[in-house]
Amino acid sequence: KQEVTQIPAALSVPEGENLVLNCSFTDSAIYNLQWFRQDPGKGLTSLLLIQSSQREQTSGRLNASLDKSSGRSTLYIAASQPGDSATYLCAVFRDDKIIFGKGTRLHILP
Amino acid sequence: GAVVSQHPSWVICKSGTSVKIECRSLDFQATTMFWYRQFPKQSLMLMATSNEGSKATYEQGVEKDKFLINHASLTLSTLTVTSAHPEDSSFYICSALGQVKVLAKNIQYFGAGTRLSVL
């Protein structure tokens, strides 16, 4: 059974710092891995999608990596800003099922 | 824990017919539910936000007359794909916002998804 774990559950860092969010999954047979952002009371916003054949994707200040063999993905946020404060979710997709981690709640201190 | 039931899990229909997908929060009330769609090899994308007793808010590019959303009660939201065509074939997933009182915050709970195949 696929399980997705995100560490840490919560993180507070001063503005301007670079940070890394971690996601691990137990079954490496995945189609893709996705990172989302969730603001309070809002739906998910897709950030990055990494296909199973890819190792990383970049969008602006965000970089996500995927290591299927070790069952790990990281989301790197450069030069963090207060507007980055949100909950970040990773999810793996396989066999018409998408399984989410519980998220990392990020707070950027002004 | 909170559970969101989505039904059906898989549906095949002929082009031109309408398909209804149900999303139920089983042990909590959800004033807000979300509908997402995922095409093959693409990310899950938000389609609309459904609020109980009011009209749904659709994301840009999503046709509200094509994807009818009804949130008639605090535990049920439905998505109806009207006059479905092969290009509507996709994976649809719903989620519901439930309040965890002890944490004084809302958590989003996801259904298992519906695979729609339009022939």
Image: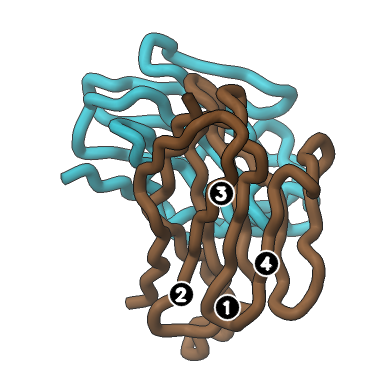
Chain colours: A cyan, B brown
Find disc 1 in the rendering and name its residue.
B30
Residue name at image x 29 percent, y 21 percent: A68
Residue B23 appears in the figure:
yes
In front here: B108 or A25?
B108
- Secondary structure under tag 1 reads loop
Residue name at image x 57 percent, y 40 percent: B17
Judging from the image, mark 2 belongs to the subunit labelled B
Rendering coords of residue B28 (x, y %): 46, 84
Say the numbered circle drawn on residue B25: 2
Judging from the image, mark 4 belongs to the subunit labelled B
Looking at marks 4 and 2 on the same chain, the residue that comes earlier in the sequence is marked by 2
Disc 2 marks a residue whose amino acid type is Ser
Residue name at image x 67 percent, y 66 percent: B70
Rendering coords of residue B5 (x, y %): 39, 65
Find disc 3 in the rendering and name its residue.
A88
Disc 3 marks a residue whose amino acid type is Tyr
Q: Which is more foreground, mark 4 or mark 2?
A: 4
Residue name at image x 32 percent, y 49 percent: A5
Judging from the image, mark 3 belongs to the subunit labelled A
Q: Are marks 4 and 3 in contact (CB under 8 Å)?
A: no
